[in-house]
Image (cartoon, rainbow, N blue to C red):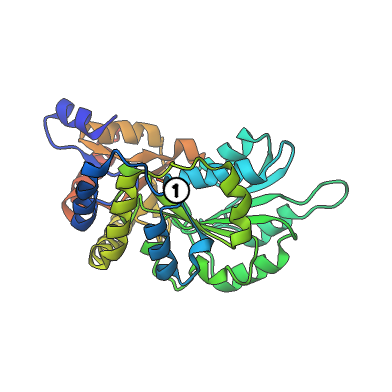
Amino acid sequence: MSAEELTRRTGRPAVKLASNENPLGPSPEAVRAAGQVLAGLHRYPAVLADDLREALARHHGVSPQQVLVTNGSDELLRLLAETYIRAGDRVVVPHPSFSVYSRVARLMGARVQQVPLNAGGAMDLPAMAAAAQGGDGVPPARVIFLCRPNNPTGGVFGAEDFARFVEAVPAGCLVVLDEAYKEFDDTPFNGPDWLDRCPGLVVARTFSKVYGLGGLRLGYGLAAEAVWRPVLAVRDPFSVNAVAQAAGLAALADREHVARSVELAREGRQFLTQLATELGLRAYPSQGNFVLIDVGRDAEAVHRALLEHGVIVRPGTSFGLPTCIRVTCGLPEENRRFAEALRAVLHQGDGA
Ligand SMILES: Cc1ncc(COP(=O)(O)O)c(C=O)c1O
């Protein structure tokens, strides 16, 4: 149900904490930049989003040739699958995690092997590296997908574990490290720092989360130039529209908005984790702009009961977590509305 629909139904502004969006919205600079492009919409956009590509290269300390700007990171994930995965290839994905990895791999006819997260809700890197090995007639994995911080748990792995993982990955295996939520992460690990050490590494980033531009569809990948060459042959030339390119450039430059957004998520994580503790529920340790809470009962029922209070969260059912809800860090007043609603729902025994 959309927030607008729920607002109409309950007669009170709905609180949407379901899609890990930025509750502050986009940077005002990005909105202004988007508006300035409108009069020139008769022109096709730059094929490789050159200005944004160069700004991203400077931001990450890589060369522009190592950057590919895409129509959301969803397009990047699909392009990588279309380029590198053939029917019958083995692909290793974490579970539970972002569903698009399995979806794009299966679309290409891959055999997908899911590797469970560790107890802390982060990737089990030794198990993933082991799953990727070939032998006894089994080919090594073609692609491994990693998500850090992981959606929906918010868990992260450390640099030492990743160093061992990089050593253990079979030669020729593409490692796709999705850092959609990296900006919210307090740890020093940074995917792009590993590009030199791991020639088959692709780091996926998005403007949909900390930059608050999900509606525009803008993402990008960082990798060795050689990784992109075959991808460029597959990609549609005009997939990233001119408004998104201009808004992305302005959003990237507005570091103050990014800092405010990160701080808000940090406070939200603390608030939601504390709330769960007070209610005797388990909150997964999160470095994202969301917290996964095990409500210890049917999450779909809790989700429906929360809707009655005008609050939308994401039930964990689709992730294979039937007693968990994923709650996006909202504005302080939105977090309080959620807390009030959850207390009421649990108190009434709704969803028990
Ligand atoms: C881990 C992860 N990667 C990628 C995306 C999608 O990003 P985009 O909007 O850039 O396609 C999401 C969106 O929720 C996500 O959670």
Residue at 58%, 42% in the rendered image: 234
Look at the image and tell me whether residue 214 can be seen.
no
Q: Which residue is mark 1?
A: 47
Instruction: Give residue 11's position: percent from left, percent from top.
Output: 11, 30
Looking at the image, which is closer to me, 56 or 306?
56
On screen, residue 270 versus residue 73, left or right, reads: left
Q: Position of residue 240 (x, y in %)?
A: 40, 45
Locate residue 102: give its quadrant. Answer: top right
Please say whether residue 169 is visible from this viewpoint. Answer: yes
Q: Position of residue 242 (x, y in %)?
A: 33, 46
Q: Is residue 317 above or below residue 265?
A: above
The structure residue drawn at horizontal position 34% and vertical position 56%, both measured from the top left corner, is 289
Q: What quarter of the picture does the N terminus occupy?
A: top left
| Left or right of residue 93, residue 56 in this image | left
Q: Amino acid at mark 1?
A: Val
Q: Residue furthest front?
A: 43
Quadrant in which the C terminus appears:
top left
